[in-house]
Image (cartoon, coloured by chain):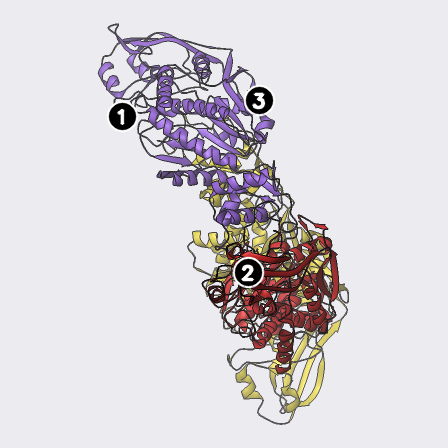
Chain colours: A purple, B red, C yellow
Amino acid sequence: MPDRIEEIRAYLNRLFPVCRSITGPGNRETLKVLQEIVPLEIKEYPSSRPVYDWVVPPEWSIREAWIKNPDGQKIVDFDRSNLHVVSYSRPVSGKVSLAELENHLHYRTVLPRAIPYRTSYYREDWGFCLSYEDYQRFFRKEGEYEVLIDSTLEEGALTVGELLVRGDSPREYLISTYFCHPSLANDNLSGVVLTAFLARELSRRKNNFSYRIIFVPETIGAVAYCAHNEAAMKAIDCGFVITSVGGPGRFGYKRSFDPEHVINRIIEQAFQESGIEYLVYPFDIHGSDERQYSSPGFRINMASICKDKYYEYDFYHTSLDNLDFVKPEFIEQSLRLYLDVIGRLDDNLVFVNQQPHCEVMLFRHGLYPKSGGGMLPGRNTSEELDIILWLLFLCDGTASLWQVAEKTGFDFKDIVRVAGMLESRGLLKRIDERMTNQS
Amino acid sequence: MPDRIEEIRAYLNRLFPVCRSITGPGNRETLKVLQEIVPLEIKEYPSSRPVYDWVVPPEWSIREAWIKNPDGQKIVDFDRSNLHVVSYSRPVSGKVSLAELENHLHYRTVLPRAIPYRTSYYREDWGFCLSYEDYQRFFRKEGEYEVLIDSTLEEGALTVGELLVRGDSPREYLISTYFCHPSLANDNLSGVVLTAFLARELSRRKNNFSYRIIFVPETIGAVAYCAHNEAAMKAIDCGFVITSVGGPGRFGYKRSFDPEHVINRIIEQAFQESGIEYLVYPFDIHGSDERQYSSPGFRINMASICKDKYYEYDFYHTSLDNLDFVKPEFIEQSLRLYLDVIGRLDDNLVFVNQQPHCEVMLFRHGLYPKSGGGMLPGRNTSEELDIILWLLFLCDGTASLWQVAEKTGFDFKDIVRVAGMLESRGLLKRIDERMTNQS
Amino acid sequence: MPDRIEEIRAYLNRLFPVCRSITGPGNRETLKVLQEIVPLEIKEYPSSRPVYDWVVPPEWSIREAWIKNPDGQKIVDFDRSNLHVVSYSRPVSGKVSLAELENHLHYRTVLPRAIPYRTSYYREDWGFCLSYEDYQRFFRKEGEYEVLIDSTLEEGALTVGELLVRGDSPREYLISTYFCHPSLANDNLSGVVLTAFLARELSRRKNNFSYRIIFVPETIGAVAYCAHNEAAMKAIDCGFVITSVGGPGRFGYKRSFDPEHVINRIIEQAFQESGIEYLVYPFDIHGSDERQYSSPGFRINMASICKDKYYEYDFYHTSLDNLDFVKPEFIEQSLRLYLDVIGRLDDNLVFVNQQPHCEVMLFRHGLYPKSGGGMLPGRNTSEELDIILWLLFLCDGTASLWQVAEKTGFDFKDIVRVAGMLESRGLLKRIDERMTNQS
């Protein structure tokens, strides 16, 4: 799909430079650009309102920020990279000694050319991030350094984007991504862009289930969204946190908290059938917004398919996680995987045999092999007939199609196809049961 | 038991030639002969009545059927074998070309001397079956062949036989056999005769449970019986479909749908204790009337103990499945196995300790070892005492005697005997719980 | 703890000679001595009253008992060892022939110097126990032997001791020992003394749960206690029968009836962490008062930690089970093990996250690592933080702290400590659920 790859490339280029945070104008701008792809509804949650154990923070804006050396030369400049300023830095202006300034400088010795990414959302502070090389080069002189951070922290709102894609069933799966990171490509501009294109694809398909697709700032955005949509979120069984899907490294997935959940098994099957080698990251209490969605109050099984998963690649949370590292081809490959997995999940219906007492009369429904004398397995019967018989036998409302596949060993897609055929003849009927951990 | 073997031989000889089908006079005649063995109640389900997804078919009678070659010689004659006519063939009379006739001839090249067994219950048709050798010998000449099938398909009834053997508990086990096959000895005259003798034995015994023993035409007969006895059938937990029990080949059993069900474990134990090697056929959606009884509406765990199981032996559904192949000695051997298995199943009671708080005072009940100083396991205690103590410990209404045997490792028969002794002293009391999959 | 060892030694010496049985003055005397250690409440259950399947027996007292040979010499004398008389011997006085006397003599050939321990609680009888050496030496002469047993069997009472140690929660664990054995040191004076000191320690601690600590005659005492405290006993999930804890041999424990119960797992963990090799005795229907407490009416999971378990050591139930065999040091070692195990059990609370929707805001509660930019597992996070996060994730009321430890692999004691810290901040709240088999 070269067109889609080019589309992805264009959006990466447009969105990469935008200065995003957990609130602020860069976030609104990002969602507005994404609305070109899908009709996201934009919601604003006002500052200072409590959301569970949290409070929506003031809105952060930044216009300009730099450090000048004692000679008056700008040695660090927000205009060159929005990573240079610790996110949520309070305004500051004036001259400081090098000793004092050092307390506000962040760099990493292990990647000496990379600007690290730092935030200080909940502790009032200010700071600059820079490469270790720049630190060594520009901060040798004693003397007074002039610093400016022209930022504001004011009452405003936290912005989220939402798209509800309605399917035949009102039961929803959750698809969530976070867009609070500034110029960081894999974590998580890749996830933001993939989610937008995934939303477009799902909107164009006819789906069995519904999809709640959300763009939130990580943590506080997920918390605020849950607080504003509690009942709907409690009704969801599983879904995906989409993040770090565009690196050059290996595919992998982070399991949801119940390792036996069908979402994990479907992901592994999709990987295996597409011949992609993959890493398995067990569920961990560290991670992304599954920490909110899987908490005791919601217990949504959330999985993440990644290509160069956050935490795991060297450039994680540095300026080297840029568009040299992330490629639209990788994102498009991840997108196809997500579409495959979600397609299988969407197909995992629960049917009930409408004629539960004894067998259906196959002949009457045009399903019986031609020659009589009893069916001779493997002689005058077909795999399709076997699937028909097993579906009618197992579909008593306790087994999803996935479970039928696991019990019988037949291919899931063949089972889905035959179940659809039996549904069209009125022999099976969908029930709208919530997929549980056992499904 | 030479007498019983001779009895079986006599009934095989009388019943083998009778032309049975899913309906018709041969079926009534068969049940009438079986009434000499046990007082079967005969029930008739009228034609054209719907039974679940099915309709009771018209009754089929046949008096005469043959093919004459262009020279007027009878080359196929129903009088010589009732397998020569496709069961449920509509009447036909007149001359047909060889080319047209070929569409109505059935033979098998792999067993060139065998007449295959064919039916056409639900598609109106007619046809002849013959050996491949006869086909090659008699159908070389072009020309007009005269065919006659003097059959009728008229409103009538489907005939079933039923015997309810009442035990102490109204809880029933199901024993079902099918008698719709014409002159085929292993499948299933062997099962029909065995079931009649099994019914006679059970009628003469004192049983803990009740037995619903039925003779039905396969599939439609089982469906019709279920429809006419729905509530009773829904209350049954497990049972047997008795079929192909008289061949010279190996013993084996087809498992019920829940492989852990006690019925499967009891069968394996009976095989093992009698030193008989046996094959295990996993549950499959193809098979016999377990397809009806195990369907979602009933979910009865049905197993079949076989000697030369249907599908598996070369002569299956051909004229070579005759009384040269099947021997009364084999049927009698299978009968003894069934009696053994059913005896164990009948013994698998659930008891409740009537003195659940603390131990019973063994001394008071005459159950205590003579010398005091505490019981010294293995020194002044006996295996019987151990069984007593374990039964009193485990019998809280959740464990059947079979489960007690599995938990403790004691012999099931010893447990049954000791439980009976404790029951007679009022220490244990039977509860009439349905045996579930877990029992 | 040399002081405690000396205390134990003193009580062993005082209590060893007392003639105990299932009733009688020696039992009252024993409990009175134990009241010096802990304020036991003494309860008397009157003779002849039915308790479940049993009846409280008459009270037995004995003042004097001997056998004189035909020469008038005392050859067996109760004054030298209370094991010489079969417990509950009826009074007897007069001359008997050697032949008749032989029916009333008990000795063991395998330990020729040991006096065996014998009882005849429920069959009216009398008898003497002596070493095989004494038997051979003193009973060669034919002639009349004079015997005296100056005992009484009269209406009285069965005596038990009870201490209820109240903790924060009214939920109780059961600690039971039996004190019906006369001068036998390991079985079970060791258990009696250990239990008294254990009770003292628990009384001095602040406990999460409550402890029902009882001293009963084995079997009939446990039965009578259950009958008089049925509701309280039915509410108990698990506990210990304390017996044979002072031998020189190996440690071991007898499992409760549910091998997966947390009590068994905690015992094994305590053994392993203290580096003690131990034997595992599976649950068996023979044993001590778990036979009563684990019976269907109560189903309390009772375990026993032993050092030279009853049944297993050579001197079991003989006069060689004396204070040369049992050492206070061993009892003290067993006591420490019991305190360790009970401490863990006491810590196995069930908590509920009070902020179940999404994560708590760690920063607000002073629990967040200093530098922002997301938590980097293993870099700026600590094991303590991980435990905090897992506890908040898993504590939904279904998992005990023990289960949290098993799921996460963190040390149980660390989990207990962190849970306490979170409770003190109001983030976790104890629920007073009964620990079930699954806990």
The Cα atoms of the two marked residues, 2 and 3, are separated by 85 Å
Q: Circle 3 is placed at which residue position?
A: A228
Amino acid at circle 2? Tyr
Q: Quadrant of residue A113?
A: top left
Q: Circle 2 is placed at which residue position?
A: B145
Q: Circle 1 is placed at which residue position?
A: A111
Have a look at marks 2 and 3 and say if they share a chain.
Answer: no
Q: Chain of mark 2?
A: B
> Around disc 3, counting alpha carbons within 10 Å, would you say few (fewer than 14), some (14 to 19), or many (20 or more)?
few
Q: Secondary structure at mark 2?
A: strand
Have a look at marks 1 and 3 and say if they share a chain.
Answer: yes
- A295 in relation to B262, above or below: above
The foreground one among A242 and C389 is A242
Q: Secondary structure at mark 3?
A: helix
> Around disc 2, counting alpha carbons within 10 Å, would you say few (fewer than 14), some (14 to 19), or many (20 or more)?
many
Q: Give the farthest residue toward the bottom.
A: C142
Is the residue under label 2 in contact with that under label 1 (CB below 8 Å)? no
The Cα atoms of the two marked residues, 1 and 3, are separated by 41 Å
Residue C5 shows in the view: no
Mark closer to the chain start, 1 or 3: 1
Amino acid at circle 3? His
**Given this view, does label 1 or label 2 mark the residue nearer the observer?**
2
Question: Residue C318's x, y, as percent?
Answer: 55, 74
Amino acid at circle 1? Leu
Residue A128 shows in the view: yes
The Cα atoms of the two marked residues, 1 and 2, are separated by 96 Å
Query: For residue A140, which numbered disc appears in the image?
Result: none
Q: Secondary structure at mark 1?
A: loop
Question: Residue C281's x, y, as percent?
Answer: 51, 63
Q: Quadrant of residue C132?
A: bottom right
